[in-house]
Image: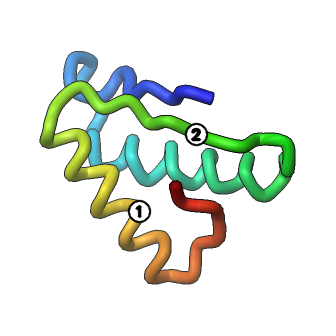
Amino acid sequence: MSFPSISAGAYRFPVERAARIALAEILSALRLNADLQKVVIVCFDRRTYDCYERALAETMKRGGHGRRQ
C-alpha cells in the first residue's frame, strides 16, 4: 500500500499533525490486517519526511505497535 502525504502544505493542513494522524491509521491497519505486508509513505520533500520520522519516533516511544520496514 502506498500512502502519499496529501493536503499537507499546499492546502495548509499542518504537516506535523498530518503525519501523526497518518501513522496512527497506518499502524491501526497493520494491526487489523495481517495480509498487509508493506506500507510506503510518499513524502514530497525533506521537511515532510522529517515530520514523519519524528512522528514515528514519538509513536514508537509511546509504545506504538506496528511493523517498521
Q: Quadrant of residue 63?
A: bottom right
Give the residue at x 14% y 39%. 46
Q: Is residue 55 above or below residue 1?
A: below
Whether pointer 2 and pointer 1 mark residues with C-beta atoms closer than 8 Å, the reply is no
Mark 1 residue type: Leu
Q: Which residue is mark 2?
A: 39
> Where's residue 34, x and y in %?
85, 50
**Number of numbered discs:** 2
Give the residue at x 48% y 75%. 60
Secondary element under disc 1, as helix, strand or loop, is: helix
Mark 2 residue type: Val
Q: Quadrant of the N terminus?
A: top right
Q: Is residue 30 above or below residue 3?
A: below
> Where's residue 9, x and y in %?
21, 26
Say which of marks 2 and 1 sits in front. 2
Q: How is the image coloured?
A: rainbow
Q: Looking at this view, is 13 or 30 the one in front?
A: 30
Farthest residue, direction left: 46
On residue 56, the disc is: 1
Secondary element under disc 2, as helix, strand or loop, is: loop
Give the residue at x 20% y 51%. 50
Left/right of residue 4 with respect to residue 14 in the rendered view: right
Left/right of residue 47 with respect to residue 11 in the rendered view: left
Q: Looking at this view, is 20 or 31 the one in front?
A: 31
Mark 2 to mark 1 CA distance (whole Å): 13 Å
> Where's residue 41, x and y in %?
44, 36
